[in-house]
Image: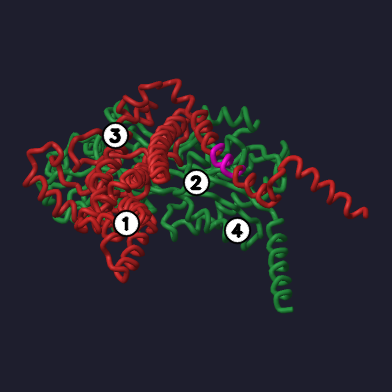
Amino acid sequence: MKIRTIIAAIFLALSVSSIANAQLQLNGAGATFPYVIYSKWFDEYKNVTGVQFNYQSIGSGGGIKQVIEGTVDFGATDGPMTDQQLADTKRKQGTDILHIPTVMGAVVVCYNLSSVGKGLNLDDETLADIFLGKITKWNDEAIKKLNPRMNLPDRAIVVAHRSDGSGTTFIFTDYLVKVSKEWETKVGKGTSVNWPVGLGGKGNEGVAGLVKQMEGSIGYVELAYAVQNIIPYANMKNKAGNFVEATFNSVSAAAEGASKNMPEDLRVSITDAPGKDSYPISGFTWLLVYQNMKDEAKATALVKFLQWAMGKGQSFASGLYYAPLPKQVVKLCEKKISLVTANGKKIK
Amino acid sequence: MSIEEPVNKKDIFLRKIIPSQNLGDFIFERLTLFFTVLVFLLVILMGYEMYQGSRLSIEKFGWNFLVNSTWDPVQEIYGALPIIYGTVVSASLALLISFPLSIGVAIFLAELAPSWLEKPLSFLVELLAGIPSVIYGLWGIFVLVPWIRNEVEPFLSDRLGFLPFFQGAPYGFGMLAAVLILSIMVLPIISSISRDILRSVPQSQREAAIALGATKWQATKIVLKDAKSGILGATMLGLGRAVGETMAVTMVIGNRAQISASLFDPSYTMASVIANEFSEATSDMYLSALIELALVLFVITIVINALAKLLVWSMEKKWKTS
């Protein structure tokens, strides 16, 4: 009798959960960097509307691949899709892809120098030369000139970089390509590159581990990671010539600076952005949405969610160490979102 | 009557195809055969899929993939030589260290240890094999690497710095750390399999040797001689583990695709490259090159395992005849 009751209870529980599953569910896959805020958003949004999102953070590359193959309802990426990939999607899925920026992240240059502590200043050229292996000592003239009052030791610089493919590397190398001709021709930009010097660490924690352990090392990690783990990072000289510390405000300022001449499809890099308060090494992360979706219920739910993400959703960003989108960019995004259709019909 | 008839028919039918066998045996035999063939097909399918997936890269680079040493995802130039080098060197050096240790452990456990000590020791050795590799990696980062950087590397470059193997800046992260962590990970595999093999040498061998006046060491030598191909098989399995290890290695090896004689320098292994770069590989050529890397690793692992199986098999045959 007892066992029967238990079995009955299990069946009841299963059937209840399957009813819940029968509700609308949207599947997405892609970038790992925005995973924390996306899962927060999906959770909050489910509480409000009951629409369930299933997001797999398999990496930007995997997200783009699945969008091209049409195995997900939406994708997510830290680096925009290439023209070739957009053409492939158009050919296979018969629809354009919209890039919707959701939040921003920044990459900071972290270092370990006990005689300096916090507040090292760096500029674009020096940073590129360090990562090219041309500046090898901390007391190099170029670094001295930027930090006249600091006690820079005669110590070898140990460069640390990401060994796994990542959006963080993409933003960082995108910046270096913009500011250094030599970097552009020798190395280039991408989620993984052929680094001229240095040690590779897996993930933000891997790079931070290398930097924390080795006196005289320099590396790059996400702003959120550096803030949470209290790792000192350098102030970067921006286009306007000011040394700027990476904060949510200076990242948003970079987006504002870049928003003035935003391309129509919002596939834009905001590294080395103009504006006196702009932090130069920052970037968007995007959701990839089919412009024309086949399932009307899903299309409606996705559009509603995106509108919510642009409004209330943005308020969750800074608590989770992401920079919220500035108002101008939100407006551009809302315009993009309104373009989504279901079988050619507009979403109400 | 209508119930008996089909039973009779079935019996006759079965007797025709399997005259001397019981039905249960027949099903059991076929079922196991089916699963064996399934595993075999799975391996072939994996190889085929990887070949298909890497066609793009094989066609573009050909043998250059194996001899070129630039790995540049931006320019889309893929040469895996330093990565293959890193894999082979780290695994072989790890084996060089762990082989004598493992055999020592195996001999002690199988031949010398009193049973009250042997049981807990065997348990501990087997426990080592069960630790997830990410735990080894974390231990490597926080304990092994600082120790290597502060103690081992300065010591080695002081005493043996004239050799090309011990030159360069002491980062801690590098080939040496990978070799040490791999040798610790491989040790329990070789030692526990070797122990079982030593135990399976007939007791009469030892008794005969001792009866003839041999010392304990001489008797052990005879046992070792009997077990040598099995121990070699165990070593091959250990090598297979070392070649395929991903997480612990990538956390300590420094992840730099280069060929350097110095053990202090960072290096890279095939399994680590695949794990690190696969998720963000967006272009078809990049993906294809990574799959080709997997294919090379697959072939190396198969060759190692086939060698091991062959050795174990030849040893068993020898026992049967003796």
Query: Chain A appears what colour?
Result: green
Q: Chain of mark 3?
A: B
Q: Chain of mark 1?
A: B
Q: Which secondary structure dominates the residues rendered in magenta?
A: helix
- Tell me where residue A343 appears, x and y as whole percent: 72, 37
Three-letter code for the amino acid on which mark 1 is drawn: Leu
Label 3 residue SS: helix
Residue occupied by mark 4: A45
Does the magenta segment cover residue B290?
Answer: no
> What segment is highlighted magenta in the picture?
B34-41
Closer to viewer: mark 1 or mark 4: 1
In this rendering, do the residues under marks 2 and 1 share a single chain?
no
Circle 3 residues within 10 Å: few <14, some 14–19, many ≥20: many
Closer to viewer: mark 3 or mark 4: 3
In this rendering, do the residues under marks 4 and 2 share a single chain?
yes
Closer to viewer: mark 2 or mark 1: 1
Q: In the rendered image, which quarter contains the C terminus of chain B?
A: top left
Q: Is residue A220 left or right of residue A50?
A: left
Three-letter code for the amino acid on which mark 3 is drawn: Tyr
Query: Chain B appears what colour?
Result: red
- Tell me where residue B196 appears, x and y as whole percent: 37, 55
Q: Residue at x 32, y 68 (%)?
A: B115
- Tell me where residue B191 appears, x and y as whole percent: 32, 54
Q: Residue at x 68, y 63 (%)?
A: A17
Residue occupied by mark 2: A58
Q: Residue at x 88, y 54 (%)?
A: B4
Three-letter code for the amino acid on which mark 4 is drawn: Tyr
Residue occupied by mark 3: B85
On residue A5, which mark appears? none
In this rendering, do the residues under marks 2 and 3 share a single chain?
no
Circle 4 residues within 10 Å: few <14, some 14–19, many ≥20: many
Q: Chain of mark 4?
A: A
